[in-house]
Each structure stands twice: as structure tokens, then as C-alpha cells.
Image (cartoon, rainbow, N blue to C red):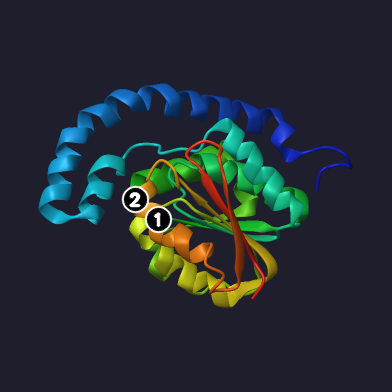
Amino acid sequence: MPRAGSMSLDDPSTKSVLARLHHAAGWSEIPRIISSLPQATRALTREGAPAFTHALFRTSYTAISAAQGRFLYVAARAVDARRIVEFGTSYGISTIYLAAAAKDAGGTVIGSEFEREKWEGARANLAEAGLADYVDIRLGDARKTLVDIPAPVDFVLLDGPKELNLPILDLMIPKLRNGSVILADDIFRFRKAMSPYVELMQSGRNGFSSASVPIGGGFEYSVYQG
């Protein structure tokens, strides 16, 4: 663990990797996403939402912003999160913030990523950031890779295909402790796709108190009180 008053996010290796990845996500992805839009739209019309998600985001970073990453770190540290679960690791930007929080709490991050290229990239990025010992990134369908996570789970980030948020939530609820936090990304950027999730979390029907946080694409911040 770091010395009192220090944060793993301030480690030079971690800061350097995050700066590189945020730059790549913010600039090099724009032409790729724009060029993918017509293809993704055709896929949506022909095959539905999962095809759209796959066509548009299979190789793009789809990353959180630096401000969102700092928020993730602080939110995880606020609840002293020691077992953190991430759905949708991608190239590992959000994972680095979560792993820094896990390191500072003496915990670990269990992530899941469907695309092998992203999984390999995330593992390399986390190793370069000096955080490989604090993560377990699993390759495959999160509905299978996250089944055997032991309780209690302290913190969950949902940032994968939006149509899978509710199935992953169902997996996590039995493992949560009182006071656990779930953050779901992109509630404003993908408002329609995220509306069933947001409505459920704010309904009071499943043991959560929840609020929308206007940062980046929008987080739904939910505290389990079941």
C-alpha cells in the first residue's frame, strides 16, 4: 500500500500510461467511429442493437474521460472498495483508475472483456502502469466470466454493451454488501438504450438509492441498501 497521504494515481508510470491512453482515445478514435457510423446504422436496421454495438465499438476505445476516471477512483476509495468488478474493460483506461483504488485499499479488480485484442491491450497497459498485480481481467462473455466472483463485492462499473447491463446487474446483486456502489456509464450518451436500467435503479424496487451524475457521458450512481 502507498504511504499515508499518497495515491497510486500519482505514480509516474500510472500517470504516463493514462496520458498516452487518453490522448489515443480522444483523437485517433474519432475518424474510426465516424467512418463506422453508416455500417453500424445498417447493422442496427438489419439485426438490432447487439449488432450495432459490435459494429461500432469492436475495436474502438470507448473510454471514460480523465475527469470520469478521477471520479471512479474517488468513489471506490470512499467506500474502501476491495473487491471491484468491471464489466467492459476495453483497453483498460477505466481499469487503471479502479486498479489504483484497489491497490490503495489492498484489494483487486475483476474485469471482463469480450474482444481478445482489447483484452491483450488492457493487460499490457496495466502492466506498464505497474498495476498488473491488482487485476484479474477475464476474456469472454461477462455473463459467464463473472459468475464465480465471491461475495462481498464492494464496487461495480458497468461500461460494456448496454443491452447487457441488466443481466450483469442480476449477477451482481446477490454478491453485494450493504453500501456497495454500482456505477453505470453513458446514461446521457445512450439515453434510450440506458433508460430501462436507469428507471429500474431509481424505482426503489430493488434495494438501490440512485442518482444521475452529469460527468462525461453520464454516470448512474447507485448505492445498494438491500
Q: Residues within 10 Å of mark 1 (few under 14, many from 20)?
A: some
Picture mark count: 2
Q: Is residue 68 left or right of residue 43?
A: right
For this rendering, which residue is in front, 31 or 202? 202
Q: Quadrant of the C terminus?
A: bottom right
| Residue 222: image tag | none
- The percent position of residue 150, horizontal first and vertical second, equals 60, 74
- The percent position of residue 62, horizontal first and vertical second, equals 40, 39
Q: Amino acid at mark 2?
A: Lys
Residue visible at 26% across and 41% down?
56
| Residue bearing mark 2 | 192
Q: Amino acid at mark 1?
A: Ser
Measure the alpha-carbon separation of dots 1 and 2.
5 Å
Quarter location, residue 4: top right
Q: Residues within 10 Å of mark 2 (few under 14, many from 20)?
A: few
| Residue bearing mark 1 | 195
Q: Is residue 12 left or right of residue 122?
A: right
Quarter location, residue 60: top left
Is residue 109 visible in the rendered image? The answer is yes
Quarter location, residue 149: bottom right
- Secondary structure, mark 1, is helix
Q: Are marks 1 and 2 in contact (CB under 8 Å)?
A: yes
Vertical arrangement, residue 98 with respect to residue 33, above or below: below
Outermost right residue: 4
- The percent position of residue 221, horizontal first and vertical second, equals 59, 53
